[in-house]
Structure formats: C-alpha cells, structure tokens
Image (tube, helix red, strand yellow):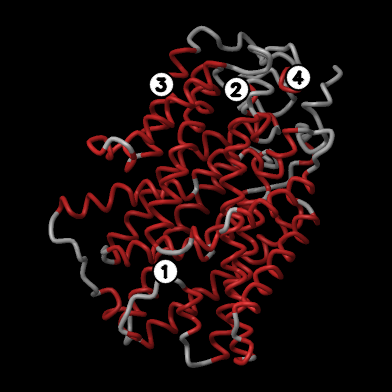
Amino acid sequence: MKYDSSLYSHDLAPIPLEKRTWGVYNYAALWVAMSVCIPTYMLASGLIAGGMNWWQAVGTILLGNLIVLAPMVLNAHAGTKYGIPFPVLVRSSFGVKGANIPAVLRALVACGWFGIQTWIGGQAIYSMVRIIWPGAASPAVSWICFLAFWLLNMYVVWRGIEIIKKLDAVSAPFMTVVLLLLLFWVTSKAGGLGPVLSQPSRFHSGAEFFRFFVPSLTGMVGFWATVALNIPDFTRYAKSQRAQILGQSLGLPPAMTLFSFIGVAVTSASAVIFGEQIWDPVVLIGRFQQPAVAFVALVALLIATLNTNVAANVVSPSNDFANLAPRWISFRTGGMITGLAGLLMMPWKLMASAQSYVYGWLVGYSALLGPVAGVMIADYYLVRARRLRIDDLYIRGGAYEYAAGFNPKAIIALVAGALVALIGLVLPPLHWLYDYAWFAGFAASALLYAGLMQGSGEPAVVGAYAGEEA
C-alpha cells in the first residue's frame, strides 16, 4: 500500500520486530535515569517547604507515581504491539490530521520542560565555574553557562535515539551511587538521619493537610503525565509486553520514591545545617564549604539533568513536530525546534518558587494532558478493544479520516475535559476541580468520548503490523 507522504516518514513508521532491542533492564534504567534529576528532587523538597514532614512527602510521591504508572502501562501497550509512536497512535482517536492537536499540546509542555531542565543544568555549570573561579560570578557568565548546556543537549539530540539508550544504561547505576553518597554526606553533617527526619509537619489539622495534599498529589501525577502520553515513543522498541511492563514497574515507582526521599532528607538536613530549608539543590550545593565535594555533586546533577532532558523532553516533541509535516521535519529537526521553543518559554520564571513550580506549572498543564490520556485510553481499550488498522493510520480516506481528517467527538471530549479541570480557576466554589485537574479532566474526557463513540469500534485487525498480538 502506498502511504500518504503527509502522514508517513521513516521516523514515524512502525518499528520491525527484528529491530526491537529494548529489554527489562533498558526500561528500568530509562526510568531510573529520568527520575534522577533536579526536578524530582525539587518535587519532594517543595512538599517539605510547603509544610509536610518526611513521610507525608514521600508517601504523596509514591502514591502519585503508582497512580500514573497505570496510564503509563496502558498507553505503552499499543507502542509495543504495533511498533508505532505516540503521534501516530492518537490518529486512531483524533483522526489522521486531528492527531496534531494532542501532539502539539504534548510537544509544547515538553518544550517547557526542556527549558526548565536546561536552565537548571546551566545553573549547575555556573555553580561549578564559581567553585573553580570565584571571580567569574556574574549574570553574563550565568547566561553563557545556560547556553553552553543548551548546545550540549542539541548535540545529543543530533546523535539520535540510540545514544539515549547508551547514556541511560551507563548513567543510571552511576547516578544512584553518587546521590546515595550525597545523602550520606549531608545527613552526617546534620548529625544523622534522626535530627533530619524528626522535623514535624506544620499542619495543625486534617483539613489543613488535605487542602495541601490534594493539589500536591495532582502535581505528582502531572509530573509524569507528559510521558504517560508519549510512552509509545519508547515502547515501540520493546522486545515484548513483559519487557516494558516489568521494566517500567521496576523502574518508575521505586526510583521516584528513592530519589524523592533523598530530596526530602537533604532539604530537611539543610534546615539543621544552615538554619533554613533550601529547596533548590544547586543553591544548596553551592553553600558547601568543601569545593571538591560540591564539584563532584554538581557534575552528577549535570549528567542526570542531561539524561532526563533528552529522554523525557526531546523524544516526544521531536516526533510530534515531525508529525506536523513528515516530509519536511525529521526527528533531528523536531529536536532543534524543541530546543528553540524551550528558550522562548522563559524557564527561569517557571522555576521562580516551589509554588509556581508545583501548583502553577505541574497542576496547570495536567488539566490539558489528563483529558488527552482519557481519550487515548478510552479509544484503544473501550472503543477498539486494542485492534487498530495500521495501514489506515498512514493514509487519507481510511478508517481514521472522520471529517476531513478530524474526529469531532474526540475534540469535543478533549475540550470538555479541559474545561471541567480548569473551571475551578474562575469559579471559586469549584476550585476543588482544579486541585484534582488531571483526575477530573481524565475522567470527564474518557467517559464522554466512550459515550460519543459507542458502536464505532474496529470490527477486526485489518492491515495490522505483524507485531505482538498480546
């Protein structure tokens, strides 16, 4: 069959079985490498700064990651079964042209994350420069470090997807050891874990705690709501469903919980050592009196930030932008677009405080991505029972043409879910809906879409790629 050149390219084509080389370790390592990053640390330290004690913060993060693991594994299934990326998968629900709507939404959020990670990495380099050369401290040098780290990210993107696999496989165990040593060193300076973990919660009632807990949990889910959509971009390389399910289950919740605990413990230790809670690890490490220790810690954070940034924030938008015009935009070109957009989104403002990071950025965009996840999962499992016409995903006038390439029912469900999640921002009595933004948007969109599409499922697998039938 001849595919439409506006829908097909080498980067978007199904991955043949013989080229699927990712096993359990690769997916576990991917999640360890993506979890070991400064935003993970700040996620936990932000909860401590907001008033939680150590076990409340770690428990909130563990629960959030167990919740987001469910849509992660569900959306991953199609990638492994058919070898297709996220922007191609959403063509079945939104239409071959309408798929650009959720793809661009996901891509813009990823661009914001790319900018945030690049800004953090640049600040880590700046801190290292000041340790080596104290006289270099100036805003101009800070911006030069930021741009230097941006260029390093662009180089890795230009090398392609396989370098990400190699970086993750090597760096994941290395970063685990380095951060555990950092935890040991900082807590020893604070007199051990006892004084660190004895910091009490600042909430005086259950009601006060839950007012903080609910949006915090939504933020935890929102943290990986981006990858929960585009996980097929990675699982299309899986050897089997077992490899992706087991690898993700072994990698995501344990890694996020462990490294969040490090963030909780180190932030609590900063209050004991310096008399104030310092939620930004780059600022905290810059306060160390031992230059050698600070330098090694910053190098470790820099490597972690590079890994996470490329794997979590470049792979998806590169494919998403390529989906807009496959003939003209390759994976590499999409990566360059991501890098430039990340600069334009001014990440230094998104990271101004724990409040703007968790409750503005994380909860805010989860109101848009939750509805997309709801439509995707309802379409694949409830409407189509995991049966897709793969050839039709790459042609005009096929099963997924709908109305001029757009599925109005999916768009209506997406908009309705987003409105449900965001309405609390303008109607104070319904503010609780915004606190539950991802959950509210997901449920509303999934239910509405399934209802609108009743009786529209696939009768059989026609032209399906010869992948797994599981």
Q: Amino acid at mark 3?
A: Leu
Inter-mark Cα distance, 3 to 1: 37 Å
10 Å crowding of disc 3: few (<14), some (14-19), many (20+): some
Tag 1: amino acid: Gly
At horizontal 64% and vertical 41% (from top left) the residue drawn is: 235
- In this picture, residue 353 sits left or right of residue 111: left
What is the quadrant of residue 334 in the picture?
Answer: top right
Q: Secondary structure at mark 3?
A: helix
Name the spot of residue 287 as percent of width and height, x first.
Answer: 46, 86
Picture disc at residue 391: 4
Q: Is residue 363 above or below residue 355?
A: above
Residue bearing the label numbered 2? 94
Percent across and percent down for residue 149 are 68, 68
Q: Name the residue beneath numbered marker 1.
A: 263
Label 4 amino acid?
Answer: Asp
Viewport quadrant of the N terminus: top right
Q: Which mark is residue 447?
A: 3
C-alpha gap between disc 4 and disc 1 = 47 Å
* Residue 403 percent coordinates (x, y): 64, 12
